[in-house]
Image: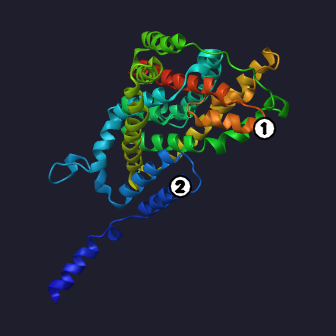
Amino acid sequence: MDYVLDTLGNLIHQSAFFGLTWGNYLMIAVACVFLFLAIKKGYEPLLLVPIAFGMLLVNIYPDIMATPEETSNGVGGLLHYFYVLDEWSILPSLIFMGVGAMTDFGPLIANPKSFLLGAAAQFGIYAAYFMAILMGFNDLAAAAISIIGGADGPTSIFLAGKLGQGELMGPIAVAAYSYMSLVPIIQPPIMKLLTTKKERAVKMEQLRPVSKLEKILFPIVVTIIVCLILPTTAPLVGMLMLGNLFRESGVVKQLTETASNALMYIVVILLGTSVGASTSAEAFLNLNTLKIVALGLIAFAFGTAAGVIIGKLMCKLSGGKINPLIGSAGVSAVPMAARVSQKVGAETDPTNFLLMHAMGPNVAGVIGTAVAAGTFMAIFL
């Protein structure tokens, strides 16, 4: 009988209940909130579901992120190896290839002025950098944190890894992906505050048709120009443009389908769960995390506002032919930000169709955020 009781006692004490801290329970609650937002509210479920579940797992069983040095048999935890692919910048680069294969760059080619709106929305990144310095972060950490302002999770992870900010990668990635998911909540109040009803109702002329040759040449020319000027952008810009070339060339349908579907979703699973698993209570619940979350929100708001303000300026200079709402799509969240521009415009005039016009700044924002990351790497590495 004593043997049975001792065995039961050992099993009970080996359960997670006896090893968890209040911080672990808090993070488990946060993970459940994220799952609710993803499943019930539909906020970017492809991102939030794996991130939230990774967060859940690591706070119940921390050893799932253990390094080989921390284990008795020299074999690390499952999600540790997923996370290594983040640190090596492999998964963020593959995400960019998938985005390129899924995205039509035609609206940007048809309206090159969209580059100005995409560039304007990067203002939030540089504003956040200087604010992070004022908050006590060093140059490398401030640069890694500031990319959150582009609402681009893969670029945030990529830059944090390249700048050696592994200890901040979890909070940075979670903040970036959280704000990407909350674009429909964060952006509309800013857009409405900075524009008048008349501006929001502006109808834009139909974009000109873009030839197949233009679509094929665009990724090649952009890669050559951007990577010659900033070679450090090659992993991101190169993969983005390679994916788009798969799409537009018309001769590698199998590669296009793989990059935009099977491979993309596999990478999202690996990246999402590993990012979530980097948010153990010990790593996440500290003052720096609160600062990062606050800086990310400020940067994202500044980027949205800057895009809308430049959109207003372009509206006036064009004689009212450009709807300022498309400026908000200059952040990198493709295609969510473009959809929000369409939604806010349709609330003012249901017959207004801004989606394709907003895709131009949206694609430009992806390129702009990668260029911003490359600039920081060129300066600090």
**Numbered circle sitting on residue 39:** 2
| Among the two numbered marks 2 and 1 on one chain, the one whose residue lies closer to the N terminus | 2
> Dividing the image into 4 quarters, which one contains the C terminus?
top left
- Determine which residue is flagged by label 1: 350
Measuring from the top left, give residue 194's x and y in whole percent. Answer: 77, 33
Q: Is residue 205 above or below residue 5?
A: above
Q: Residue at x 39, y 64 (%)?
A: 21
Tag 1: residue type?
Answer: Pro
Q: Is residue 219 above or below residue 266?
A: above
Q: Could you tell me how far apart the alpha carbons at marks 2 and 1 are, in whole angstroms? A: 28 Å
Measuring from the top left, give residue 27's x and y in whole percent. Answer: 46, 58
- From the viewer's perspective, tell me whether residue 164 is left or right of residue 199: left
Q: Residue at x 42, y 36 (%)?
A: 261
Q: Residue at x 46, y 27 (%)?
A: 101
Helix, strand or loop at label 1? It is loop
- From the viewer's perspective, tell me whether residue 198 is left or right of residue 165: right
Q: Which image quadrant for residue 256?
A: top left
Q: Is residue 206 visible?
A: yes
**Numbered circle sitting on residue 155:** none
> Which of 63 and 145 lies nearest the eye of the viewer?
63
Q: Is residue 17 above or below residue 280?
A: below
> Which of 138 and 199 lies nearest the eye of the viewer?
199
Q: Is residue 287 visible?
A: no
Q: Residues within 10 Å of mark 2 (few under 14, many from 20)?
A: some
Tag 2: residue type?
Answer: Ile
